[in-house]
Amino acid sequence: MSVVTLQLGQCGTQIGQALFDCLAAETVSDQGPARSPLDAFFRPVDERPSRTTRNRRHARAVLVDMEPKVVDRAIMSAAHSAANWCYPPNSSFSQQSGSGNNWARGYNSYGPKFASAVCELVRREAEQADYLGGFLLLQSMAGGTGAGLGTYVAEAIRDTFPSSFLMNHCIWPYQSGEVIVQNYNSLLTLAHLAEISDGIILMENSALHTACQRLLSIQRPSFNDLNGVAARSIASSLLPSYYRPAAGGTSQQGKQVTLFGDIVEKVCCHPAYRLLSLRALPRMPPASLDFTTFTWPAILRRLRQMQITGSVVEEGLQWNMKVNSSDDIRSQHINRSLAAMLTLRGQGSRQADVSMFSHAGLYTPWAVQPLTVASAADRFAKCEMSASLLSNDQTCMGLIRPMQDKAYKMYNAGAYLHQYKQFGIDKQDFDSCFARIEDTYSSYQAL
């Protein structure tokens, strides 16, 4: 089952490189028949092995940016990677002019002009797969290329491969502001992707920043640090894993989780709910691993409290929030979920009891199969035990509402609308976008 990754814009290109570095660094132990992640995300080098290409693999990826600098740097860095992987030749598309953080320019100008060339690169990479599991699109929501052109490319991929699964991983901007028009860009991106994507994993820059500072002891995190945290979280949920019962206590290995079909079926089972949050534990400085005692009860207890409170960072959790009774649920704002997929990795992952995640108060009453559990015996990121929770829940509401309020204020004042009108986005398009975002927000509010 192969996954083709599209790295869109500067943010998507950098996160993609970090993701492939993380995947390539993971090895499979002799504790089970798990397939190497290289089979899904990498393919063998086509040419005859030589001293420089022996054992190297090509990432199943296409890189897209309107400026060549970041793409060229990523390709060069991968070519010298210690993890022994590289990008295929002729797998990138770039021009000499950026989008100027204008979503309309990326979507309405560059999109129709360059989408066919990008789709041709994607088609060639997809044809290298024996069995195509789907597409993973990595992008920012705040800029012009990753957000605007990236959205157009996503729609073109959906039209070109209508029966394939399409997953988006989107970086939500800092609330304090990275780009002056990020409120418009983020909502336009979200409104369009929600119409065509099978699942959208949202990660907030401020949460990644907090994780670096408070959990990894990096006082002044760079974007490379943030990208590394995001990449490890994605990899923790995409590496090979196998179904197991919630109660645990079994040594039997179930059917392998299929990318991306099983994730869409289990977690994105309703067309009105496509926004996902991703939580992963533990997060700690590498130097602390040798001095840390891992236990499943401790890891799972923290992860469950993160699910209850809607926090994506374990620092500063509200431990007073409980779901022990119906009174607790009525008196507190519990982060409700439609469905969740819990993945455990490492020693004892098949036997660990995760029944605490099955509590009915964590899920909407009409959920058909709220919890899916998978495990893998292999360690992840050198941790003896680790867990990730991919959840379709109300976390997105805390991101959408502040962004909406700021966008409405700018819109009512007529701020920067002329920049969008110049490239074919008028007030009617904004009104349609805002209406779709309101519908999405209302749907999650009703969980």
Image (tube, rainbow, N blue to C red):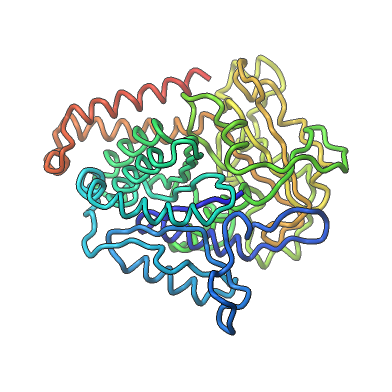
- Whether residue 340 is visible, yes or no, is yes
Q: In the rendering, at what x and y percent does residue 407 appear?
A: 26, 34
Q: In the rendering, at what x and y percent does residue 151 appear?
A: 34, 43
Q: Residue at x 48, y 63 (%)?
A: 17
Can you say whether 298 is above or below 437 in the image? below
Q: Residue at x 44, y 36 (%)?
A: 162
Q: In the rendering, at what x and y percent does residue 425 appear?
A: 18, 36
Can you say whether 275 is above or below 363 in the image? below
Question: On the image, which quarter does residue 195 sit in?
Answer: top left
Question: On the image, which quarter does residue 409 sit in?
Answer: top left
Q: In the rendering, at what x and y percent does residue 184 appear?
A: 27, 38
Which of these two is toward me, 140 or 138? 138
Task: Determine whether, in the image, residue 115 is placed left or right of residue 261.
Answer: left
Which of these two is toward me, 367 or 47? 47
Q: Residue at x 46, y 24 (%)?
A: 272
Question: On the image, which quarter does residue 39 sit in?
Answer: bottom right
Q: Residue furthest bottom?
A: 51
Can you say whether 130 is above or below 396 in the image? below
Q: How many marks?
A: 0
Task: Determine whether, in the image, residue 424 is placed left or right of residue 44.
Answer: left
- Whether residue 308 is visible, yes or no, is no
Task: Determine whether, in the image, residue 189 is placed left or right of residue 302.
Answer: left
